[in-house]
Image: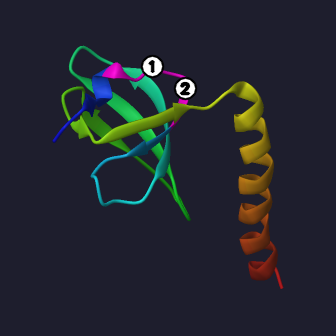
Amino acid sequence: MCMYSYGLLEPGCYYLIQEESDSAISLIKVTMKTDHCMYVFTYDDQMVTGWRRKGDPIHDIIECLTDEAVEEWEKHYNNNEGAYYEEDEE
């Protein structure tokens, strides 16, 4: 049962979503919106970018993150990215 779609999301905002009822929670950021599509960054072990149709289903939009929550998350995410690069430099 589809409850939401990407078209409800606002550019520049970070969201915790669940695309399917049995899928893991994902952190996404909508970066731009066209007449029919949205360009979305999905943050996991690595960032994945791609276009989504505004009508593509989302099972649940759990929350829109506050600016403070995004800042806190960025500290942890950026620290983890640096750990991978430090290993490669040796």
Q: Badge 2: few (under 14), some or many (20 or more) residues near its Cα, within 10 Å? A: some
Residue 30: percent from left, percent from top: 46, 30
Q: Badge 1: few (under 14), some or many (20 or more) residues near its Cα, within 10 Å? A: some
Q: Is residue 22 magenta?
A: no
| Amino acid type at image mark 1 | Glu
The quadrant holding residue 34 is top left
Q: Residue farthest to the bottom?
A: 90
Measured Cα–Cα span from mark 1 to mark 2? 6 Å
Helix, strand or loop at mark 1 = loop
The foreground one among 90 and 2 is 2
Quadrant for the N terminus, please: top left
Residue 14: percent from left, percent from top: 55, 33
- The residue drawn where x is 78% and y is 81% is 87
Q: Which residues are magenta?
A: 8-15
List the residue tagged with mark 1: 10
Helix, strand or loop at mark 2 = loop
Residue 72: percent from left, percent from top: 79, 42
Give the vertical position of 2 relative to 22 (above or below): above
Q: Which mark is residue 13?
A: 2
- The residue drawn where x is 34% and y is 21% is 8
- The residue drawn where x is 47% and y is 21% is 11
Give the vertical position of 7 relative to 86 (above or below): above
Q: Is residue 90 left or right of residue 63?
A: right
Residue 75: percent from left, percent from top: 80, 48
